[in-house]
Structure formats: C-alpha cells, structure tokens
Amino acid sequence: MTMRTVEAGGPRPYSIHIGAGLLDDGAALAAHVRGRHVLVVSDSNVGPLHAPRVATAIQRQLPHAQVIVSCIAAGESAKSLDGFAELLRELADLGATRDACVFALGGGVVGDLAGFAAACWMRGIDVVQLPTSLLAMVDSSVGGKTAVDLPQGKNLVGAFHPPRAVFVDTSTLRTLPDRELRAGLAEVVKYGAIADPGFFAWLEDHVDALIARDDGVLAEAIARSCEHKAAIVARDPREQGERALLNFGHTFAHAIEAEQAYDGLNHGEAVAVGMVLAARLSTVAGMAPPADAERLRDLLVRLGLPVTRPAGLQPQALLARMRLDKKADAAGLRFILWDALGAARIVGDIRDEDVLQVLQ
C-alpha cells in the first residue's frame, strides 16, 4: 500500500502520513528531532508491541541522542494530573532541553497526556504523534488539542499544541482489539454525519470491509477523516467557532463517560450513543427529520456500536454533568445539532426539558 499524505494548515502546518510500516522508518521519524533528547511515551498495552522498535529506529539514525521509553498504565485513568506530573519528572530526569522531542505512541490517552506534557515542558517542546488506535488516527492525533481529566470531568485541563508531524501506521490496527476498532469507527462516522453525506453513504456501502480490516478501505476512511478534521482545524485552530462541530455527540458522550467514572463505555462507544442522542434532540427541537436520526442509528448498529443510554445512568445526573462541559457558556448549554445528515451547526438555548426527554 502506498503512503498517503494529508497536509494540515493553520499557524503551525504539519503533515499527516498514512501507510503501513511507518513506525519502522527511522529516517522519517528522526527528521523531526531537533535536539539530542527523545522521550517515547506509550502505555502498557501498546508499549510492548511497538515501543522498542520505534526507539531503536530513532536511535539508529541519531546515535548520539538519548532515547528513552516511558510506559504509562493503559486506560483513561492514566490521563490525570498525576500521570502528567510523572511525564514531567521523566523529562527532568532526562535533562530535556528546549529542542527535545516527545513521541506519543498509542491511543488518544497517550496522545493527549504526552502532548500536554510537551506543551508545558519549558513552555513547549516538539511532539510527534504516532497514533496506534483508529480513534486516535482520525481524531485526537490531529489538531493539537491536548489535555488531562479531572474527577469533575473530561479534558478540563489542557493546551493547544500542534504536533510537528503525525505518522499513521495502519499496520498497528492488526493488533487493535475489535472493541477499539469499532470505537474508532464511531469518530469516522462523525465526519460524514456533520459535513459529508457522500462519505456517510460510502461508509454504509463498506461496513463489511471496515469490520474485516481491509487495509485499503481503512486507509481511505482514515485519509478522508483526517482531511475533514485538518480542514476544519485550519480554519478554526483554537475552537472559536466551526471546530466545535467536531464535538457532535460529545456533550452527551463526555457526560456519560464522567458519570461512569471512565469505567463503562469507552470514548468511541460513548460518542456513538451521543451522536444518536444529538440527532434525536435535533428532531425534538424541530430542526431535522427523524429519518436521518434513524439512518445514523442503523449505521452505528451495523458497525457493532451501542446506541442507547447505558442502564443505571440518571438523566438529571447527566444533565448536571453537561453544565460543566467546555461547550457550555454563560447563556447555558450549547449542543452540536443538525438540520439534516451532513449539515451540523452549533445551537444554544436548548431547553432542559428537551434534553431530558431525549435522555429518558
């Protein structure tokens, strides 16, 4: 499979490279290291599979550099202030200078945590994103948003810190658990849902190939998703307007994740549920036809994703969580809703009773 490249614009442009075997390309990886200190951050699931070869590939190209690997615990619970502090200690012990480089090798948790550490060490050092989950490949590795969670909510402490480059090695998807693959597909569906009905229809036609991990079909889905995200981020790098559309379904999803203490649905699964709830809220608010919400629900079901509020979560508790969401403002809750499939927009002043009706 040939490598594909998507260019991400904005104040600090970078390239997103998509192809098989990119983690072994030491020359390409090392080209983004400006100094002699390299910290490869991974987790306890991904690290044993891929970290040694990444570190070795870089070290071969940069024999005089110090290249160390740091593995955090796998799972959302590691994306905490404690986890952040631990990475800062690693950088301090390494003696990392301002031209040091962090490689974030893993899923969204690793990308967010390592990216935030890079954003804060000496007020900002380079980070290269090496996403190994489909979710990270099409979402969190692109756009430069980094963050950690607090007990009160997800991603409440963070910074905008674009990477120097993103390398999407599609061969890592072969070791990705089925549940994680499906979770990533939820974010792929999101791009069609908010902006591209043609891509949505393409996904409907390629469900079986996506689930079967067809290399070409997955690469196409990843490239088209990255193109959408990169274009939106370039127009709105700091989420002052249009970029908020990428949070379609996320207001509900983040509330579900927090209410489950990040120990229930994973992020992609919560987004799948959240998108269905947002589509239904669009219908309740008189904006969109119910048929579009059903079409979205049907595609997510075919991809093996959940589409209903998890049992045991109370609507009032979820509503309270949403009030702390970053998309809320002084005027109240804001949601990303749609007028039709592929036509999302930001909507304020949504009534609590409409939200509760959808959550019942």
Image (cartoon, rainbow, N blue to C red):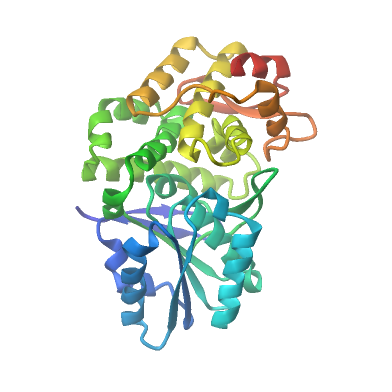
Q: Where is residue 101 in the image (x, y as percent from the top left)?
A: 49, 73
Residue positioned most to the front: 312
User: Does residue 167 show up?
Assistant: yes
Q: Position of residue 126 (x, y in %)?
A: 52, 69
Examine the rendered structure and indicate whether residue 80 appears above or below residue 36. above
Residue positioned most to the right: 330
Examine the rendered structure and indicate whether residue 128 appears above or below residue 241. below
**In the figure, residue 196 lies in which quadrant?**
top left
Which residue is located at x 47 percent, y 44 percent? 229
User: Does residue 206 show up?
Assistant: no
How many circles with numbers are drawn on the protein? 0
Q: Position of residue 71 (x, y in %)?
A: 46, 65
Which residue is located at x 72 percent, y 19 percent? 352
Examine the rendered structure and indicate whether residue 82 appears above or below residue 96. above
Locate the C terminus by quadrant: top right
Residue positioned most to the left: 1
Instruction: Indicate left or right for 170 with 160 as reference.
Output: left
